[in-house]
Image (spheres, rainbow, N blue to C red):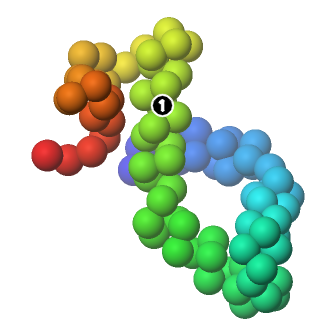
Amino acid sequence: MSQVREMLIREIAEWIETEPLAEEITDTLEEQESEVTLENAQKLWLDFLETGLHSGICYSLAALVDKGEIKSEWIHGKEVMNNGVHNHPCQEG
């Protein structure tokens, strides 16, 4: 990993606020009438990291590219209409 990339990752990690994440996890557990415990919160967060984080970030990136707020040559032109439904550029296939 390049030093520039490592520095950027550290800067992003310092910038990310963890309290809103903890609040969202707690709110979701409460809304779904699940037991709100540290163990359940950890399970939920770790599962999200494994199964949902990449796609969520990718969808947000595509939306920002669509709005012209971020430039991306990779995504540009990859979102296509399929029977009136947008296929997301991060989906495989």
Left or right: residue 51 compared with residue 6: left
Name the residue: 58% across, 46% down.
9
**Residue 29, located in which quarter of the rendered image?**
bottom right
Please say whether residue 78 is visible from this viewpoint: no
* Pick the front one: 32 or 3: 32
Query: Where is residue 93 shown, x and y percent of the image?
Result: 14, 46
Query: Where is residue 40 shown, x and y percent of the image?
Result: 70, 86
Residue extending furthest toward the left: 93
Name the residue: 82% across, 74% down.
30
Vertical arrangement, residue 55 with respect to residue 84, above or below: below
Query: Where is residue 89 shown, x and y percent of the image?
Result: 29, 34
Left or right: residue 92 compared with residue 24: left
Mark 1 element type: helix
Q: Amino acid at mark 1?
A: Leu
**Residue 42, located in which quarter of the rendered image?**
bottom right
**Residue 8, located in which quarter of the rendered image?**
top right
Query: Where is residue 90 shown, x and y percent of the image?
Result: 31, 40
Vertical arrangement, residue 89 with respect to residue 19, above or below: above
Name the residue: 28% across, 25% down.
84
Please say whether residue 13 is visible from this viewpoint: yes
Left or right: residue 77 compared with residue 17: left
Query: What residue sits right under mark 1 in the picture?
Result: 61
Left or right: residue 57 compared with residue 24: left
Vertical arrangement, residue 86 with respect to residue 22, above or below: above
Residue extending furthest toward the front: 83
Vertical arrangement, residue 50 with respect to residue 92, above or below: below
